[in-house]
C-alpha cells in the first residue's frame, strides 16, 4: 500500500489536518517468498543489491514525506534469530528505506517477551489514531 504523497488525517480527526506519523507493523516471518526467490538467493550469497544507490518510487515517497516532517517508521516483530527471509529484508530492503528517512525497529519477542495484546497481523497506523489492516496469503 503506497501512502499518498499528500497525506491528510482520515475523517474524524479534523479534515485536512496533516498526518504527522505513519507506522507499519510487520508480523509474518515471510512475505511473498515466491516472487523473491531470485533476490533472496543473491542476497544470501553476498552479491551486491541490484540498483543500489538508485532512488526507487518507495524511497522517494519516504524522502518526500520525511522532508515535510512526517515521521515514517516500521516495527517488525520477530522471535529469535532472523530467518533467511528477514535477513534479506533487513540487508536489501530496510537499508534503502532507512537511508531515505524511515526508522526501522525490530522487536524480538524471544528477548523481551511478547507484549500483551500484540496481534499476528500487519497494520499501517496513521497518527496513532487510525489503523489499516494488511491481509496476506498464508504463504506471505
Image: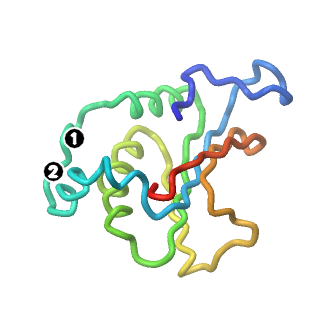
* Secondary structure type for disc 2: loop
The residue tagged 2 is 48
Q: Residue at point 63% right, 63% down?
A: 120
Q: Is residue 39 left or right of residue 85?
A: left
The residue sitting at 56% across, 30% down in the picture is: 3
Q: Which residue is mark 1?
A: 52
Look at 51% across and 28% down and name the residue there: 67
Along the line of sight, which residue is nearer the eye, 34 or 80?
34
Q: Which mark is residue 28?
A: none
**Vertical placement of 72 versus 48: above or below?**
above
Question: In 3D space, how far apart are the residues under numbered discs 2 and 1 (Cα atoms)?
Answer: 8 Å
Spot occupied by residue 36 in the image (x, y as percentages of width and height): 30, 50
- Packing grade of label 1 (10 A; few <14, some 14-19, many >=20) is few
Q: Are marks 2 and 1 in contact (CB under 8 Å)?
A: yes
Instruction: Residue lying at the far front in this picture: please name it.
Output: 138
Q: Which residue occupies the foreground of this view, 94 or 136?
A: 136
> From the viewer's perspective, is 76 left or right of 130?
left
Depth order, front residue of 7/119: 119
Amino acid at each position: 500500500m503506497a501512502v499518498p504523497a499528500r497525506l491528510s488525517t482520515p475523517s474524524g480527526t479534523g479534515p485536512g489536518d496533516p498526518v504527522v506519523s505513519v507506522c507499519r507493523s510487520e508480523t509474518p516471518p515471510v512475505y511473498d517468498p515466491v516472487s523473491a526467490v531470485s533476490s533472496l538467493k543473491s542476497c544470501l550469497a553476498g552479491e551486491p543489491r541490484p540498483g543500489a544507490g538508485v532512488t526507487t518510487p518507495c524511497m522517494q515517497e519516504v524522502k518526500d514525506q520525511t522532508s515535510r516532517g512526517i515521521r515514517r517508521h516500521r516495527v517488525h516483530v520477530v522471535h529469535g534469530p532472523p530467518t533467511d527471509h528477514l535477513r534479506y529484508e533487513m540487508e536489501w530492503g530496510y537499508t534503502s528505506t532507512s537511508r531515505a528517512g524511515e526508522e526501522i525497529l525490530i522487536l524480538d519477542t524471544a528477548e523481551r517477551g511478547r507484549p500483551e495484546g500484540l496481534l499476528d497481523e500487519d497494520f499501517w497506523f496513521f497518527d496513532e489514531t487510525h489503523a489499516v489492516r494488511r491481509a496476506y496469503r498464508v504463504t506471505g
